[in-house]
Image (cartoon, rainbow, N blue to C red):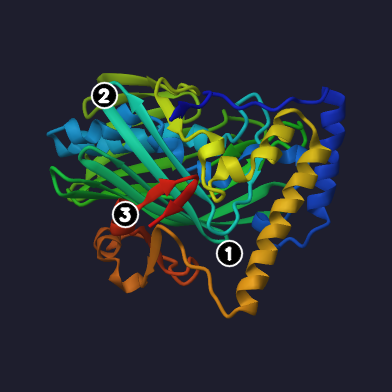
Amino acid sequence: MEPISKTQRTIHDDSKSMGRRFVDLAKFLSSLKSDLDLANVTAPPFFLAPSSVVENPGSWAKKPLLFTAPTKELDPAKRSLSVLQLFLAGLRSQLYVAGAPNVSIKKPLNAFLGELFLASWSEGDSDTTLVVEQVSHHPPITAMHISADGIRADGYGRVEMTFNGNINIRQMGHAIIHLDKFDEDYLVPLTDVTVRGFLSACLYPEIIGTYTIVSSSGYVSEIDFSGAGIFRGKRNCFEARVYHKDEPKKHCYKLSGVWSEGWKITDSKGKLVATYTVDPETSADMHIDPVEEQDPRESRRAWGEVISALEQGNYRDASHAKHEIEEAQRQKRRDEKLHGKSWEPLLFRSLPGDEHQVFHQLAKGTKWKLHDHETKGVWRVDDEALQRMRKEDGQITI
């Protein structure tokens, strides 16, 4: 296993050239129907990140100490605070794809059906393992599983994108975090996102609205994302509070700040408890198999030529390599149809929504909706298949 560099950057053109490119992008998006789902629309190459969407769920796994922190807290209110911190800390790497607060974000590559991303991280005394699979292409649905000592996270999400002057991203799905020691579950939301900044040629993500993280212990984390207005406010602002559902007006902790930069935490008396700074880099070492040893379905091997071309700013070669991969996938689907076969996920299985008891128990009395008819059911890792998974000569078998 070899460490992967902590940063992935693309070579940018001069600002004048990029300004023209953003004008072209805005014109392209404006020419599309306002209700057209852009999730599977081919974006101009300069707007593409040198990574696939299957890498996005790594935003939690790449912070092992933060991911395992809830397992070390005896107080259920502090455990809820730890899960809230994990959620907030993962937003920057999840949403600022190939960008930063002062660098325009890009669109990750659309994952092909069955695409995999397998990785692990080590930090201090904590290790995390991530498994991601693209379980549907139309509509695009990504399923993930993160495991560490005493804690696991299982989630899935479908993305819809529309354009009305901004890019509006609707996410359907959720994650369940389970703590073994306390037999405790947390229902964690996927946020809707608005991508702004077309006029300034520097795109950035903004979350608007109120979301909750619900725990089986009875504690609730409520996050109010206010964002920045056109003429006032700071980007990515939020306020949050942790309280017990039986006393919703009595908070245990309050958080306020900027989710892409940092925040402060105060207790019920207003005393400062801690501050947190979002580090765009991670001190954890990330490990995946060398590209030449990966299965053809693994993301960095499959998209290798595209990623290389994008990192060099060679958009023509990136577009050509991307087209070849996508056409090969279309041919696979045609061959399967010709032979009467249907594709099946390798590591994840779809369950009927009414069997997802943890969700229904935690969502009771809230505004949460499962949307299982729009996500082809509820996706969860097949633990037995994961245990049987082996790799030999660059091929993954179960």
- Closer to the eye: label 1 or 2: 1
User: Toward which corner of the image does residue 250 lie, by quadrant?
Assistant: top left
Q: Which residue is mark 3?
A: 388
Left-right relation of 320 to 384:
right
**Label at residue 139:** 1
Task: Mark 2: give few (<14), some (14-19) or many (20+) Cα within 10 Å.
Answer: few
Q: Quadrant of residue 50?
A: top right
Residue sitting at x 30%, y 27%: 65
Residue in view at x 53 percent, y 33 percent: 236
- Name, please, the residue furthest toward the front: 393
Earlier residue among tags 3 and 1: 1
Does residue 322 appear anywhere in the picture? yes
Amino acid type indicated by mark 2: Gly
- Give the alpha-carbon distance from disc 1 to disc 2, as whole Å: 46 Å
Mark 1: which amino acid? Pro
Badge number at residue 270? 2
SS for tag 1? Answer: loop
Disc nearest the viewer among 3 and 1:
3
